[in-house]
Amino acid sequence: MNTPHVELILANTRSTVVRHKLPSTTYGAKDEFIRIMRNAYDMGEFARNIYVFAIDGAPGASRKSYLGLLVEYDNDHFDLFDSCKMNMGNRSREGEVTSLLRNISLLTNYNHILYTTKRIPHTIGDMQPLEAACVIKMQTMKPLLSNWHAFTSTFQEDYTLISKSIFSEKEWDSLYSKAKMAIRTINTVHYSDIVNRAGEFDYINLGRVGVSGKRMVIGVSNTQASLCVVDKEALQTLVDDIGQKASFYVYEDMLPESVTTSPGQRVLSLNKVHCVALSEESQNWV
């Protein structure tokens, strides 16, 4: 494989590239990658681009292709993941890939998730991280979420475009639309701000925070949200104060307690947990 000159590929030749070793299990690799992305988001390191690619399996490997990722941050740092075992071998493995893409589409600009139209040789693992990043960046790229069907062909030995029905088509199709409608900006406000601005929100979500006595109130308008944390005892008063000014929904599952301290977890949780309309029955969730 030809290795290009760094200065021809990277705008900043002082860029740093860290190669990560992920857990050997596919679900563990998925969760660890999301954790790394979330932690970077928490520290204000935002992904400029995420490059997703299929890697040829080495001789003797159990699969003919595996998933690889290269994350490029605004500070010109790169995280390289070119040795994980995630793949598209069956519906369970495919589900892990779509789950991963759903998460990263919330933590970055969804139009900046790109895929390489050709597989990367397995020998990339023998390269120095900076060289490997250059090889990946020099490939022909296309947006992934809006071209998911073509992306799946890169895992086929001869790039065959097999029927969409073979895949979880509805899940793939929903990635792009959900990413476009996702809450992107979340600001913490006071109790009075939620009450006074209730009529401005498209809807208000109520959620239970872990096993604590805290409750979360989220006023959503388009892709922006105003968030307030209150004690359980104050929630009913807040709902009564707002009255008919807004529509209320309830998160069916508990929000993790880290949602109060982690900006990345807020983006992930507020967009992923299913909501139902507030009623006498659903109010039991909060």
Image (cartoon, helix red, strand yellow):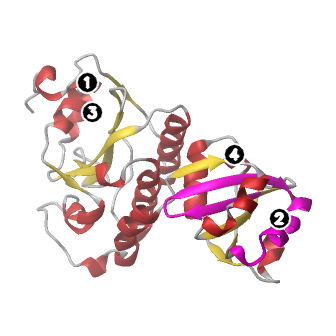
Q: Earlier in the sequence, mark 1 or mark 3?
A: 3
Q: Earlier in the sequence, mark 2 or mark 4?
A: 2
Query: Marks 4/3: CA distance?
Result: 35 Å
- Give how far across and how far down residue 222 sits, in percent: 50, 64
Q: Residue tagged by mark 1?
A: 130
Query: Marks 1/3: CA distance?
Result: 11 Å
Magenta region includes residue 230: yes
- Give how far across and how far down residue 55 sits, in percent: 24, 47
Q: Residue tagged by mark 3?
A: 125
Q: Amino acid at mark 3?
A: Gly
Residue drawn at x 78%, y 75% as measured from the top left:
243
| Quadrant containing the C terminus in the rendered view | bottom right
- Is 285 rendered above or below residue 259? below
Q: Which residues are magenta?
A: 216-245
- Is 255 rendered above or below residue 91? above
Q: Residue tagged by mark 4?
A: 258
Q: Residue tagged by mark 2?
A: 238
Q: Element type at marker 2? A: helix
Observer-side mark, 4 or 3, equals 4
Query: Marks 1/4: CA distance?
Result: 34 Å
Q: Quadrant of residue 160?
A: bottom left
- Give how far across and how far down residue 122 sits, in percent: 22, 40
Q: Residues within 10 Å of mark 3 (few under 14, many from 20)?
A: some
